[in-house]
Image (cartoon, rainbow, N blue to C red):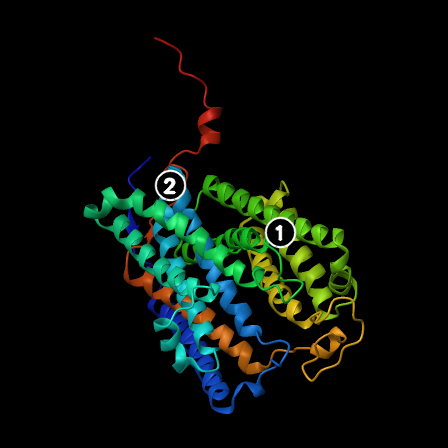
């Protein structure tokens, strides 16, 4: 293994400033959308008395769990002592911080009363999972920044693996806590499931790695830095594994619900009669987010072509948004069973009536706010790799450490 040399992202200045200008424009439009919703009130959104978490929450949760998953590459290299992933650790940490900041920014600006955030930060109700997550999110930010310091500074090298161990445990707790926000809500039939915690962990691995691979490939291809076939093989196999685990949890979750008679109405509605939610489940969650990427990643010829790998990563991300849309919004659209066994119930809040009455359609300001959070994450990443040394000069096969498969294929040396 040669010495890994890190350099700034030496993209042409015109392209860099153009990219920065586009991201800044998206952020500006998102800020205007936030100002519009803040001034007019949330009645201008598609949210209502039944669906209180809308499209901005989908963007926020996707960015937050992707931040945890993006750090997975650094954890594999440091905690599990896989040297081939070590050159990617710095970019992994930077992307984790950037995604978390983008997600939290969307979450805070969609509170309706963001000026009251100080109350949530100073008055804690530890019986609420939301209070736990305030510590998990801020703690994750501090730990990852310390992790980056231990990788970049020679004085921090002795602390690198201990900090990495803390970061691994912390991010697993963070993602489990995010999933438990929904899993602990017993009022909604689709939320009331302990499996949502580990399912969100699996989702974070898949979505975070897909985002990481797209950023890595784009930054290396634009500047002409090489990525060897060995590194691409390891990354695509890892992505295929994580996507498979997400599909496994999906199957387990719905089979469990189908086995329990009290969830028959929910499952029939979601799988067959849920309108846009049924479409997003089968086409977005299962097909685009799962089966098609697996077909590409395991195809003997397509998985050797860079543009097909990029397409698989993009499909995983699109499927991730569809998945969270179904999990977060679809679960609210289904009517709450106010009194078990009662078949007719009417109220001004549409509780216990046909799920179509709780229809939700995201408005333009909601989508712009969510895209603004994505742009914030990309802007932080772009400036970070441009100013600081986060990217290795090369990931060619003769530079990165040999993986276990190659080492096992080598014949034993004969004695002299």
Q: Nearer the viewer, residue 408 or 157?
A: 157
Local secondary structure at mark 2: loop
Q: Quadrant of residue 400?
A: top left
Left/right of residue 107 with respect to residue 394 in the rendered view: right
The x and y percentages for residue 181 are 53, 63
Q: Is residue 133 above or below residue 79?
A: below
The x and y percentages for residue 385 are 33, 60
Q: Would residue 214 be visible to someone looking at this image?
A: no
Q: Which mark is residue 54?
A: none
Q: Quadrant of residue 367?
A: bottom right
Q: Which mark is residue 293?
A: 1
Q: Is residue 354 above or below residue 76?
A: below
Left/right of residue 195 with respect to residue 211 in the rendered view: right
- Mark 1 surroundings within 10 Å by alpha-carbon count, few (fewer than 14), some (14 through 19), many (20 or more): many
- Gap in angstroms between the C-alphas marked 1 and 2: 28 Å
Extreme residue in the right direction: 343
Image label count? 2
């Amino acid at each position: 293994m040669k010495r890994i040399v890190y350099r700034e992202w030496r993209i042409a200045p015109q392209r860099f400033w153009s990219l920065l200008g586009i991201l800044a424009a998206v952020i500006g439009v998102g800020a205007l959308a936030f100002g519009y919703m803040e001034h007019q009130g949330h009645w201008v959104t598609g949210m209502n008395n039944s669906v209180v978490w809308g499209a901005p929450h989908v963007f926020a949760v996707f960015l937050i769990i992707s931040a945890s998953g993006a750090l997975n590459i650094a954890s594999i290299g440091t905690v599990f002592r896989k040297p081939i992933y070590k050159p990617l650790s710095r970019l992994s940490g930077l992307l984790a911080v950037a995604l978390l900041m983008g997600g939290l920014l969307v979450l805070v600006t969609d509170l309706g009363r963001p000026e009251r955030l100080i109350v949530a930060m100073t008055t804690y109700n530890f019986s609420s999972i939301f209070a736990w997550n305030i510590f998990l999110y801020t703690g994750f930010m501090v730990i990852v920044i310390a992790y980056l310091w231990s990788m970049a500074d020679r004085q921090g090298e002795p602390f690198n693996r201990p900090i990495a161990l803390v970061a691994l445990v912390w991010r697993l707790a963070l993602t489990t806590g995010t999933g438990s926000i929904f899993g602990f809500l017993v009022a909604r039939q689709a939320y009331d499931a302990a499996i949502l915690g580990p399912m969100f962990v699996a989702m974070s691995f898949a979505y975070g790695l897909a985002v990481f691979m797209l950023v890595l490939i784009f930054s290396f291809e634009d500047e002409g830095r090489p990525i060897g076939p060995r590194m691409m093989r390891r990354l695509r196999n890892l992505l295929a594994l994580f996507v498979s685990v997400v599909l496994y949890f999906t199957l387990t979750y719905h089979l469990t619900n189908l086995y329990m008679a009290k969830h028959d109405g929910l499952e029939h509605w979601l799988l067959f009669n849920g309108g846009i939610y049924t479409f997003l489940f089968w086409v977005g969650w299962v097909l685009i987010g799962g089966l098609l990427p697996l077909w590409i990643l395991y195809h003997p010829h397509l998985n050797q072509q860079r543009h097909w790998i990029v397409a698989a990563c993009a499909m995983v991300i699109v499927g991730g948004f569809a998945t969270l849309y179904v999990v977060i919004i679809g679960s609210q659209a289904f009517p709450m069973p106010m009194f078990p066994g009662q078949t007719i119930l009417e109220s001004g809040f549409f509780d216990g009536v046909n799920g179509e009455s709780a229809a939700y359609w995201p408005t333009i300001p909601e989508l712009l706010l969510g895209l603004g959070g994505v742009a914030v994450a990309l802007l932080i990443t772009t400036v970070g790799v441009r100013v600081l040394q986060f990217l290795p000069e090369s990931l060619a096969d003769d530079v990165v450490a040999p993986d276990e498969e190659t080492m096992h294929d080598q014949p034993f040396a004969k004695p002299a």
